[in-house]
Image (tube, helix red, strand yellow):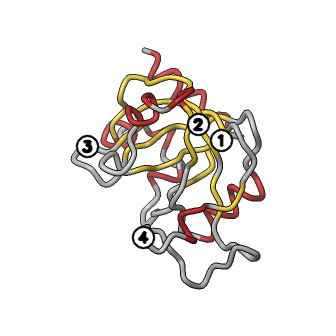
Amino acid sequence: MYWLMKSEPSEFSIDDLKRQPKRRAPWTGVRNYQARNFMTREMKIGQLAFFYHSSCAEPGIAGIIKIVSAAYPDETQFDAQSEYFDPKSATDDPRWFNVDVELVKKTRFLPLRELKSIPALSDLHILKRGNRLSITPVSDRQWKLVEKIIAA
């Protein structure tokens, strides 16, 4: 199984990940139950994901990352100074989790408009009307096609 993980580049970009020690960082701030459940129930260490820049002038796939930890409580939920603070979350019963990711490679940028122009990707979750999830699954077929496109 593969993934697509969205981040606003003004918050955390692929270049920010590249500058991290060991090119690793926690994927914090997920505040959607379905995305959280993907991390806690389905993501596995070693799986790959597309790093997708969202909510920006030109959204699209910017690179490939690898899941390098199991899900664990997202510390930002307990930090009253964080924009991701959740006063209803308790340290003994956390609501929100994150995984650590590692940069595999920065790729040719594949903009959303180009993704939309590829009929074989019409079933990609990011292209479905109303999809706002920050983490979505990517099928083997979709992964191979996108990987071929960004390698060209």
Label 3 near label 2: C-beta < 8 Å? no
Label 1 near label 2: C-beta < 8 Å? yes
- Disc 2 crowd, CA 10 A, few/some/many (<14, 14-19, 20+): some
Kindly identify the residue that appears in the image at 52 percent across and 21 percent down.
148
- Disc 3 crowd, CA 10 A, few/some/many (<14, 14-19, 20+): few
The residue singled out by tag 3 in the image is 58
Can you say which quadrant of the picture contains the N terminus? top right
Kindly identify the residue that appears in the image at 76 percent across and 53 percent down.
42
Measuring from the top left, give residue 123's x and y in whole percent: 54, 49
Label 4 near label 2: C-beta < 8 Å? no
The residue singled out by tag 4 in the image is 81
Q: Amino acid at mark 1?
A: Ser
Q: CA distance from mark 2 to mark 1?
A: 5 Å
Q: Secondary structure at mark 4?
A: loop
Q: Could you say which disc has been placed on residue 142 in the image? A: 2
Q: Which residue is at the front of the view, 125 or 60?
A: 60
Badge nearest the viewer, 3 or 1: 3
Horizontal side, residue 112 vs residue 18: left or right? left
Can you say which quadrant of the picture contains the C terminus? top left
The residue singled out by tag 1 in the image is 139
Of label 3 and label 1, which has the lower sequence position? Answer: 3
Kindly identify the residue that appears in the image at 56 percent across and 70 percent down.
77
Q: CA distance from mark 4 to mark 3?
A: 30 Å
Kindly identify the residue that appears in the image at 54 percent across and 62 percent down.
30
Q: Amino acid at mark 3?
A: Glu
Measuring from the top left, give residue 99's x and y in whole percent: 65, 49
Q: Quadrant of residue 78?
A: bottom right
Q: Quadrant of residue 90?
A: bottom right
Badge nearest the viewer, 4 or 1: 4
Q: Secondary structure at mark 1?
A: loop
